[in-house]
Amino acid sequence: MDVETRLDLVLRYPTEEVLTVEELRELLHSGEKLRHYIGFEISGFIHLGTGLVSMSKLVDFQKAGIETTIFLADIHSWLNNKLGGDLDAIRRVAVTYYREAFRLLIAALGGDPDSTRFILGSDLYHNNDEYWYLLMDIARNTTLSKVRHSLTIMGRRGEEDSVPFAWLIYPPLQVADVFALGAHIPHGGIDQRRAHVLAREVSHRVRFYPLMLGDRRVRPVAVHHRLLPALNIESPPSSREELSSLKMSKSVPQSAIFVHDTADEIREKVLRAYCPPREVEYNPVMEMARLVGFREARSSPFVVDRPAKYGGPVEYWTFEELEGAYREGKLHPLDLKMAVAGELARLLEPLRRHFQEGPGRALLEEMRGLMITR
């Protein structure tokens, strides 16, 4: 596969930003083995933003010949008081429910789960003096204001006067992870941007775990994907920062579709979702349509099965056709919602079977218990 084809895979939807495209092209031209990583806090149920959007991009990295890693951030989750701050529960959920769900998603999206490394944070840190020297070296090479500014990666306002000191440790930890994992390409949602910028800023100053490409030190190239708007938003966000607070959230069930939801649950949630006529920007239903229906060239059309009195079934081969029809008012929100719900249910059926009826049922029940008690 040539460099430009590999580059196109990394840049395609749902990628929103690369820091920088020129540096990424240089990495690909080098011919060296490249390593990617994406990290996840361990908290509630996995929703489409965490699961489907992130794993779609991960599969693109696989197809581009880049080694992929999923970092299960148990220590970060503990610092952020996820699952009530129960570190044992966090670790158990990380290596069972989260790992199984991500593997199933990768397979459903056409990737190879066996070629993705899963690394638990506490395993990376255990008996690893070099990591802690790295963490302190990062602290030596940044400022309090930059760390506070980066706290929005946790969904917090770092500029507030009173924050737990544990939160201030979180951004340097995330920066250290990039280098300790040897990740040439740290990947996350656009809300992770500030931490990745901080990693790029200190990359040539830290002494431990230098990021190498062959015999030269390089800066990490950050890839950020789009955020999936919450189903229950009431109006479009006015800025990227506002969108970060209006994304799907595990802690707000009405905002999200979970990857193991039943077909009926998916349909009910999509039917209630924000989807104003003719509006395509920040429309969660339109984003889901693009995600599940048009990332790959279609071998059969995307069918919207309208009632005969409204024109009957209509077919779309590209997202641009669907988007144009919706923008022009030729496609009703209800018809779009029904088609998207059907596509989502079909794609996620392996996860529903696994967690609702199969070997993952006990894990899902345990998660429900944890969510109730937290």
Image (cartoon, rainbow, N blue to C red):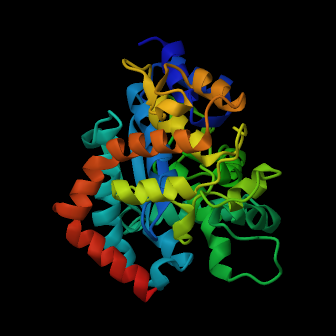
Q: Residue 278, image x and y in percent?
A: 72, 37
Mark count: 0
Residue 175 in view of the camera: yes
Quadrant of the image occupied by residue 15: top right
> Looking at the image, which is closer to me, 49 or 59?
49
In the rendered image of this protein, does residue 174 appear above or below residue 372? above
Q: Which residue extends farthest bottom? A: 373
The x and y percentages for residue 336 are: 54, 39
Residue 105 in the image: state x and y as whole percent: 34, 46
Q: Residue at 46% across / 85% down in the picture?
A: 374
Find residue 238 and report its horizontal and vertical position in percent: 83, 51
Q: List the single residue furthest toward the front.
A: 309
At horizontal 61% and vertical 68% (from top left) the residue drawn is 170
Note whether 102 is above or below 319 in the view shown: below
Q: Nearer the viewer, residue 363 or 334?
A: 334
| 210 left or right of 367 in image | right
Residue 182 seen anywhere in this rendered image of the structure? no
Q: Quadrant of residue 366?
A: bottom left
Q: Residue at point 37% right, 20% down?
A: 300
141 left or right, relative to 115: right
Considering depth in this image, is 352 or 132 the residue closer to the camera? 352
Point out the image quarter for the N terminus: top left
Q: Report the residue at 71% width, 53% height from top.
A: 194
View extreme (left): residue: 359
